[in-house]
Amino acid sequence: MATTPKQRSAPTEAAEEDEDASSSYLVAAADRALRLLTLVGDTPGLGLSELARLSGNSKARTFRLLQTLEANGFVLRKGSEATYWLSYQALRLAARAEQQIDLVRLSQPVLDAIGPRCEETVQIRVRHELESLCLGKWETTRIIRYHATVGQTSPLYAGASKVLLAFAPEAVQQTVLDSPRQSFTEDTPTEASVLRRELALIRRNGHCISRGEVSPEAFSVGVPVTDAAGQVVAALLIAAPLVRAMGARAKELLALAEEGGRMLSQALGHRPD
């Protein structure tokens, strides 16, 4: 049977996919999609042919990438001529990036002010999906200390990062409560009923104190950081070896954390009633 032109095009596209697969396909596809998204952002209103030419992709591949980006809310197809524009997810991502950049810039003076006074590790952390992400830190030079790494993630349900979970949307809290939770120590709150009570207590007290939940020798205290709209956007944490955070010292670290939380909240435009 004769092969039609339409039938000949299928092996060509399959060959493109095979080429991707032989060179880390998922990474290559993500790279092409992100480059195409950037192109749409830089040159809004172009059609499929122009975007394919400028991106260096075939029209078939460009169409598939645009469909993927559109399905995920990053681009919007407009009009009968099918031109492409950035959509709500791209704007949402840009707003979050701007907010986090502001947090990093505004938090460093706070970290530099609180850190030397407590001589313990101070962090600014934000919720990243179902994890806690370190955006900034001040670390003591003491030999025995709590180490922190910018970009490091940790569970929302253990340690002082629970303050982020306590003020997260109900859907996020429920997802964490419904998910399996790893036990790091015998004090990690893995039972849903226990964790739910702790989150309620954090909201009532306005802070979280953790002893031995992630490591048996670790103490941490966390307070919420609030923006101009009154939303909790981050947490300020102070972490120390448990042996240096007993009795009155724990109250002192809590007071310093609360002071730092107020300073950063005010820098973000929050004005308490």
Image: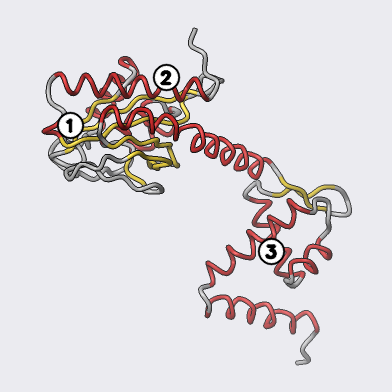
Q: Looking at the picture, how far across and down is residue 33, in whole percent?
A: 64, 61
Residue 51, quarter of picture = bottom right
Nearer the observer: mark 3 or 2; the answer is: 2
Q: Secondary structure at mark 3?
A: helix
Residue indicated by mark 1: 211
Q: Which mark is residue 64?
A: 3
The residue that appears at 63% across and 79% down in the rendered structure is: 14
Q: Indicate the amino acid at tag 1.
A: Arg
Nearer the observer: mark 1 or 3; the answer is: 1
Q: Indicate the amino acid at tag 2.
A: Arg
Disc nearer the start of the sequence (1/3)? 3
- Which class describes the residues within 10 Å of circle 1: few (<14), some (14-19), or many (20+)? many
The residue that appears at 31% across and 45% down in the rendered structure is: 148
Residue indicated by mark 2: 262
Judged left or right of residue 85, residue 96 is: left
The residue that appears at 78% across and 91% down in the rendered structure is: 2
Q: Secondary structure at mark 2?
A: helix
Q: Indicate the amino acid at tag 3.
A: Arg
